[in-house]
Image (tube, rainbow, N blue to C red):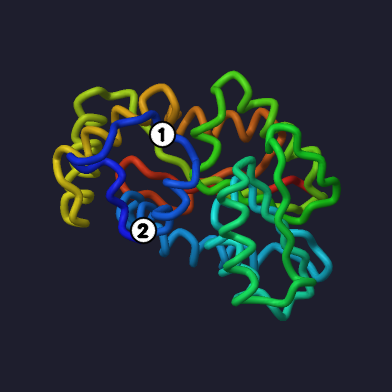
Amino acid sequence: MKDRLYQADTVPEDFDFNERVVEVFDDMLDRSIPCYKTVIRETNRLLAAHVQPGDTVCDLGCATGTALLFFTKALADRRLRFIGIDSSPAMLAKARLKAEFYIRDDMVSFEQADITEIDQPGTGAFVLNYTLQFIRPGVRPSLIQKLFKNLRPGGVLILSEKTILDDKLLNRTFIDIHHEFKREQGYTELEIARKREALENILIPFTQQENSEMLKRAGFEPVTTFFQWFNFSSFVAIKPN
């Protein structure tokens, strides 16, 4: 379904991953996150380079399962286990419905849980696609430390986030360019303004440096940015052997 949640004839509300959002979520991703499908494809390349046969690939904040199901199909010959974890029952219901049409039941599972309480020791790869930005800033370092602890040696964490810049002028420019992108996808000025208001104090971005330093403090090395589109950044972090 087309994302029309913030049009003039709708009632403004704080952003929440409820049933209304679930119905339009895939369209919202494509029209709100620049190069979303490119990031998923390049994430898959990194997974292919680092996972080992028998590994578990865990997508935290898996939403409707779009990315995880892509990985499941693309890496089908690797004998991997795929787990999607999300706190939203509505998101998981949609993900399970999709999975029925995409892959075998024994290849992927979906679990409802708070990702900040993750306990998946020996995991080969964690994926955090535009999820950490919704976690309270003070909780993020401890979550990243848990992911480091749960990864096997040589395991990989892939993190994609909306980011901000310290320079206010350039940060404003990047935001304006993102809004221009949204207009090109058919969103009106009213929809853009309403969405931004709905996300205020819910989506709290870090800078690239803050994200990189948080990963390094947890023990990841190397840590690097593998993709950037203005104020959207993707990082790859490795747990040393």
Indicate left or right for 90 with 4 as reference: right
Residue 82 numbered tag: none
Q: Tag count in the figure?
A: 2
- Residue 191: image quadrant is top left
Q: Are marks 2 and 1 in contact (CB under 8 Å)?
A: no
Which is more toward the observer, 88 or 32?
88
Q: Residue 27 — which label?
A: 2
Query: x, y percentage for residue 113?
Result: 71, 40
Mark 2 to mark 1 CA distance (whole Å): 16 Å
Name the residue furthest bottom. Answer: 77
Does residue 134 sit above or below 82 in this rendering? above
- Residue picked out by circle 1: 15
**Residue at image coords 41%, 34%:** 15
Which amino acid type corresponds to the residue marked 1 in the rendered image? Phe
Query: Mark 1, residues whose alpha carbon is within 10 Å: few (<14), some, or many (≥20)?
Result: some
The x, y position of residue 32, in whole percent, is 32, 49
Nearest to N terminus: mark 2 or mark 1:
1
Quadrant of the rendering where the N terminus is positioned = bottom left
Question: Which residue occupies 17% across, 39% down?
Answer: 8
Residue lying farthest to the top in this orientation: 138
Asked if 60 appears above or below 202 in the picture, the reply is below
Point 53% across, 48% down: residue: 129
- Tag 1 secondary structure: loop
Q: Residues within 10 Å of mark 2 (few under 14, many from 20)?
A: some
Instruction: Name the kind of residue labelled 2 in the image.
Output: Asp
Residue at the extreme left of the image, as rendered: 189
Query: Would you say 193 lies left or right of 131 here?
Result: left
Say which element carries label 2. helix
Depth check: give the residue in front, 145 or 184: 184
The location of residue 219, given as percent across then percent down, is: 72, 34
